[in-house]
């Protein structure tokens, strides 16, 4: 009978793993991402239920109460969070995932008769979970601007980090040699892992946050995988491995999009980099919504480049409305999506999907750049670093070498901004002074709404 139950549990775990794999595959396309998310969620629900039925050790009342409370909190957070707060929410999710792995590892210490291998997995679960927890909270602080978004560096920082790593290794080895619930080496690993999470995140500047979010997501998966070994749970090992691997792949994609190595992102301190001293010369040419409408009304090809500023202005719905009016007027409209636009991977895709922008209008950077010279108008809405021509032209710029959307090649460029302020990286943008650039100052939502009103009339 026990064999039959174990077989049933493992079969259900296989079903859940298959749902995870197919769900993850569907997340790779905006057209199927929602279904993929639901599929993966269904797989996790099945896994949780079968695990509770098979291995429940607590009263059912406690389990059900926890599920209800957690579901209510999650539903409330999902409904209330603004699109501008999505990167911070993802950072918190990663942090809580790390915290759960840390607690699982800590709880396993109290189990009698742990083998050396189990003790090693316990340490890995605690270490990766602790690093993910504090690293994600620092990322949250930088993204929400509760902490300085620039890189925080100090003299001897690399030496300090090296000593910290050495102390973690020594403490981990000593615990595995002398495992005990009240071991000071265990406490040292917990404390040092939490400190290390802080130390590896503070020297990373705000412009690299999309990479950090992807990397921390990978860490949370690896922490879950380690917790799976601690609990001897095959599904947790599989799901953690999937998240860890996909997070590393996404991190690599983000790095390529910025033309930087992961080592450069983690240790160069982008926000502390010396900004080019090259003087940007030119004259800003403002434009008002009425004149912008006249140009758009005659346009045959328009490219819209969204950025974090569009999320701040909550302009995605009125942008879609503008797109609809342009198409009704015989204009071809496309949305150029840079891989690191916004403050987390896929931020702009999620934003535009919320506004029901057709998926076939979303065009990746490599595909839109060869077509940019044929665009009558390129509308830059709240984007900055991802359209900065200094990345192509100024070797002294911290952005130099980063692939950007070449909006300067369009016949006319509208830049919608509240002011002349630089982007999240703090790098000035010569695009604002271009001969074919017109600055449409003000709230993006109000400006576009005015243009939409002209189309309606």
Image (tube, helix red, strand yellow):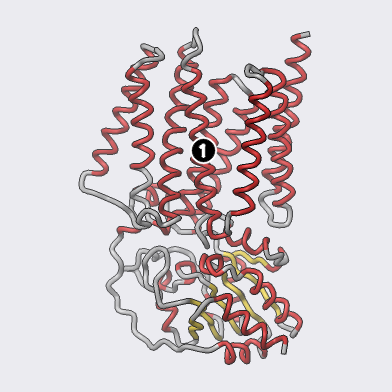
Total numbered labels placed on residues in the image:
1
Q: Is residue 27 left or right of residue 209?
A: right
Say what secondary structure mark 1 lies in: helix
> What x and y, as percent, mark residue 63?
65, 26
Point 48% across, 43% down: residue = 216
Is residue 361 visible in this depiction of the protein?
yes
Is residue 270 visible in this depiction of the protein?
no
Residue 187 image-quadrant placement: top left
Q: Quadrant of the C terminus?
A: bottom right
Q: Would you name the residue on which mark 1 appears? A: 96
Compared to 282, does 62 lie above or below? above
Residue 338 image-quadrant placement: bottom right
Q: Is residue 229 left or right of residue 394?
A: right
In the image as oriented, which residue stretches furthest toward the left? 155
Q: Quadrant of the N terminus?
A: top right
> What x and y, as percent, mark residue 369?
57, 71
Point 65% across, 46% down: residue = 75
């Amino acid at each position: 009978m026990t064999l039959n139950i174990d077989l049933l549990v493992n079969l259900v775990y296989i079903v859940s793993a298959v749902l995870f794999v197919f769900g993850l595959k569907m997340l790779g396309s905006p057209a199927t991402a929602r279904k993929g998310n639901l599929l993966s969620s269904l797989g996790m629900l099945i896994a949780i239920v079968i695990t509770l039925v098979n291995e429940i050790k607590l009263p059912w009342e406690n389990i059900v109460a926890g599920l209800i409370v957690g579901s209510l909190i999650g539903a409330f957070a999902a409904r209330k969070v603004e699109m501008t707060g999505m990167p911070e929410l993802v950072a918190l999710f990663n942090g809580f995932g790390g915290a759960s792995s840390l607690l699982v590892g800590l709880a396993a210490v109290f189990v009698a008769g742990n083998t050396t291998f189990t003790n090693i997995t316990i340490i890995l679960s605690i270490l990766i979970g602790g690093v993910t927890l504090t690293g994600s909270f620092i990322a949250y602080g930088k993204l929400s601007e509760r902490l300085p978004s620039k890189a925080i560096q100090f003299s001897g920082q690399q030496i300090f980090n090296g000593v910290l790593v050495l102390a973690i290794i020594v403490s981990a080895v000593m615990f595995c040699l002398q495992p005990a619930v009240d071991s000071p080496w265990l406490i040292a690993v917990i404390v040092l892992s939490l400190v290390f999470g802080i130390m590896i995140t503070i020297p990373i500047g705000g412009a690299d946050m999309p990479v950090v979010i992807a990397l921390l997501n990978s860490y949370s998966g690896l922490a879950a995988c380690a917790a799976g070994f601690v609990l001897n749970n095959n599904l947790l090992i599989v799901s953690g491995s999937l998240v860890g691997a996909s997070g590393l792949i996404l991190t690599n994609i983000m790095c390529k999009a910025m033309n930087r190595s992961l080592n450069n992102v983690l240790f160069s301190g982008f926000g502390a980099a010396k900004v080019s001293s090259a003087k940007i010369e030119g004259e800003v040419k403002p434009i008002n919504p009425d004149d912008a409408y006249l140009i758009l009304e005659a346009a045959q090809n328009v490219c819209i480049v969204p950025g974090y500023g569009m999320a701040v202005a909550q302009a995605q719905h009125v942008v879609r409305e503008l797109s609809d009016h342009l198409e009704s007027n015989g204009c071809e409209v496309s949305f150029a999506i840079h891989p690191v636009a916004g403050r987390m991977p896929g931020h702009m895709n999620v934003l535009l999907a919320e506004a029901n922008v057709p998926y076939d209008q979303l065009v990746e950077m490599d595909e839109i750049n060869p077509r940019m010279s044929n665009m009558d108008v390129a509308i830059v809405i709240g984007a900055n670093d991802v359209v900065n021509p200094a990345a192509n032209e100024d070797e002294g710029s911290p952005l130099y070498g980063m692939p950007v959307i070449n909006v300067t090649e369009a016949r006319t460029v509208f830049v919608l901004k509240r002011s002349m302020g630089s982007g999240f990286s703090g790098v000035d943008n010569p695009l604002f002074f271009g001969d074919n650039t017109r600055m449409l100052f003000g709230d993006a939502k109000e400006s576009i709404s005015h243009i939409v009103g002209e189309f309606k009339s």
